[in-house]
Image: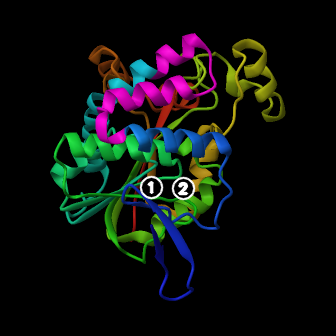
Amino acid sequence: MDITCAECDQRYPVHLGIPDLRWPRPLDEATSLTLAAGLIERYPSSSFADLVTFEIESLPTTKQLEQEYLAYRLTAVGRGVRLERMFREHLGRHFQLPGHALAIDIGCGSGASLPSLAQDFNCVWGIDPFLPDLILARKLCEERGLNNVLLAQAVGQHLPFGREAFDYARGQNVIEHLLDVESALHEVRRVLKHMGCFCGDSRNRFDLFLPERHVNLRWVGFWPRRLISWYVRTFRKVDYKGIRLLSLGELRRCLIKSFEQQFLVTLPDPSAYGYSPKWDRAITRLSSSPILYGFLSWFFPSHLALAQAL
């Protein structure tokens, strides 16, 4: 099944009701197409957990990382609820909260945050460039009876929506996968309504405290960019593709180009990622000392980006 653009006559394929609205039109890798075909074949008789297991076992990775990915995916909805609660709490401290008509989850992956968004907004769009993950998201929404969620295959650099369409845009664990962050944030600003808000977390390139979660390896971002792939292949035997960690300075520079001064980069709550609330309290205490808090910000595992469209 295809849909056709009435203006340019471009045809876009549709799989399991998910339109492929990526532009420019990409050339998909054979592994992605094979994986999507396998998921579609199993979709009618499989649960969300079954499909997640099939996807993880089909990806080229080590056995250790396979188990870590599987556990991460199967606990993602609870984490998505905690993260969305944190996003809203931080937004509420600094900006006027958005309306509740329309939200977009950029890089929604397998749908971890769609259930919590569906409770708070009249309609939610989940977009992601990777069709296999969107198939998982569709199954998740189906199992949870979410009838106000729409899914599309799309990229953050070219959002297939008109100007000022959304009250709220968010990106959970996605900024490091937006290889052109400036273009993606410009698109976010374009599709946000006046006073609409954006919130997203960004893994810090210069994290001193935790292993890089995609490969469970420390000090990845401290290597020169041209050597990062070599470092990961040497110590984890996997490719390091589709990931570009940003430092605090890089993230700020990207935000200022789209939102001027109407943004804030702060530290997220560790408890939203499953750590003890005592770390939240420690960060709160440190915030009373701008020098210590500023120093910590350069090396903390993640940053929280908040912005509002004016």
Identify whether 57 is placed above or below 101: above
Mark 1 vs mark 2, CA separation in Å: 7 Å
Give the percent coordinates (x, y) of residue 263.
44, 55
- Locate residue 222: give its quadrant: top right
Q: Is residue 7 above or below residue 128?
A: below
Q: Residue drawn at (21%, 64%), measured in percent from left and top? A: 99
In screen coordinates, is 305 left or right of 117? right
Q: Amino acid at mark 2?
A: Leu
> Main SS of the magenta segment?
helix
Tell me which label, 1 or 2, sits earlier in the chain: 2
* Residue bearing the label numbered 2: 255
Q: Residue furthest bottom?
A: 7
Q: Within 10 Å of the Cα at label 1, are there few (<14), some (14-19), or many (20+) other Cα atoms? A: many
Q: Confirm whether residue 172 shows in the render.
A: no
Which residue bears the numbered disc 1? 263
The segment highlighted magenta reads: 43-69
Disc 2 residue crowd, few under 14, some 14–19, many 20+, Cα 10 Å: many
